[in-house]
Image (cartoon, rainbow, N blue to C red):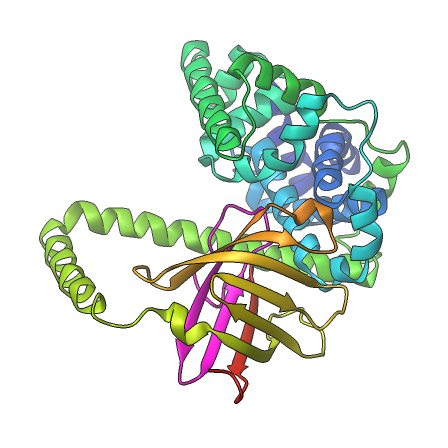
Amino acid sequence: MQELDDIALLRQYAERGSEDAFAALVARHINKVYSLARRHTANPHSAEEITQAVFVILARKANRLCRHARLSGWIYQTARLASVTFVRGEIRRARREQEAHMQTVLDENDSAAWREIAPLLDPAMAGLSEADRHAVVLRFFDGKSLKEVGAALGANEDAAKKRVSRALDSLRGFFARHGVHSSADDMAKTISANSVQAAPAMLAKTVTAVALAKGATASVSTLTLIQGALKVMAWTKAKTAIVTGAVVLLVVGTATVTVTKIAHHRQGAAAADRPSDAASLQGTWSGHEVSANAGPGACSMIIQGNKLEFHGADPREWYKATFTLREDTTPKQETAVITDCPFPQYVGKTDHAIYEVQNGTLTFAGNEPGDPAVPTSFDDPNSRKFVFTKNQASP
């Protein structure tokens, strides 16, 4: 069975230093990793760099992952997080103009259905549970039978079929909310036929050599990407632990939750008497980015009614959008729909952010347009954080 073989190969590498075993793992999963990275970057060179980073991380974590029962799903998730890190990092911004042009060029061999699904597939996969995501990866990315999927999940074929079907329904619902409608069968066929393409012929050899050296021979940009991806992975794991703890508290602390809900209700009633943030946000704001990978330079934002115009430190980075506010959440949330920007792939996409207005200072943390996730805090490494102050001439 593939998944047990994966763990056995990884154990041979971790315990005996078998380079052949690690090379076999790279050969088995490299197409999946490279294809995902291409979907995120639309740049073959960037995809190769991300692929190197993923397998270096695998080599570094081999001892711990020997006990991981869902290695194929872990590799997929690591590739996704590394790709997200790359796209949001300084490396990506330095190459943005070239990549934006490449993303406007569609492969003439791609089906119309795949061109609709491809930009949404990985964000949709991110919303699945670990077990459901692993089942989808095994079934449609790795091409495993339902019997093999069940065995990898420690279940029978019927249970695997139900889990895959439920996961497909979740994906189909996500696609439908973003204007893409397809039957479960057609969607499954499209993903199976297009989600994994062949990586360049020599990439596996290069990746294996870099990974076996634990990244010692990697470029500076690849090492930066590895460190960024590891931070995002650690934060993602921490968020999962926090959510799990919250569920436990919810189960055992019904009385406390009831009291808290009553308190929130009273606070909400009081908040209804306060003026909306929309009024205090009107005007022109100046500031700078304070994210870990932020470059130098000033940023600005103009807000008029429910419209905003943002200009980043890089003159190529600007956008116009319409927005709505949610003031009943903690932190407060802002949802913007991009109406105009230099990169066509972002127009029409939704940007989720959190914000805080205090003493004339606006703190703002947002995700990449099209990412369905909402930042959980202003320190979320997945997000870009900005601090603005209102210009004195503004109302």
Q: Quadrant of residue 58?
A: top right
Q: Position of residue 54 (x, y in %)?
A: 70, 46
Q: Nearer the viewer, residue 114 or 251?
A: 114
Q: Is residue 238 magenta?
A: no
Q: Quadrant of residue 34?
A: top right
Q: Quadrant of residue 340?
A: bottom right
Residues drawn in magenta = 352-381
Point out the image quarter for the N terminus: top right
Q: Tally the numbered discs.
A: 0
Q: Position of residue 112 (x, y in %)?
A: 71, 22
Q: Is residue 202 visible?
A: yes
Task: Please give the name of the residue rendered at 52% of the width and 11% of the height, measured from the top-left corner.
Answer: 147
Q: Nearer the viewer, residue 209 or 317?
A: 317
Task: Please give the name of the residue rendered at 78% of the width and 34% of the height, measured from the top-left corner.
Answer: 23
Q: Is residue 355 magenta?
A: yes
In this picture, is 265 found above or below 197?
A: below
Q: Nearer the viewer, residue 26 or 135?
A: 135
Residue 29 located left or right of residue 207 = left
In this picture, is 135 found above or below 324?
A: above
Which residue extends farthest bottom? 392
Residue 359 located left or right of residue 112 = left
Task: Please give the name of the residue rendered at 68% of the width and 70% of the height, measured from the top-left corner.
Answer: 312
Q: Position of residue 393 (x, y in %)?
A: 53, 88
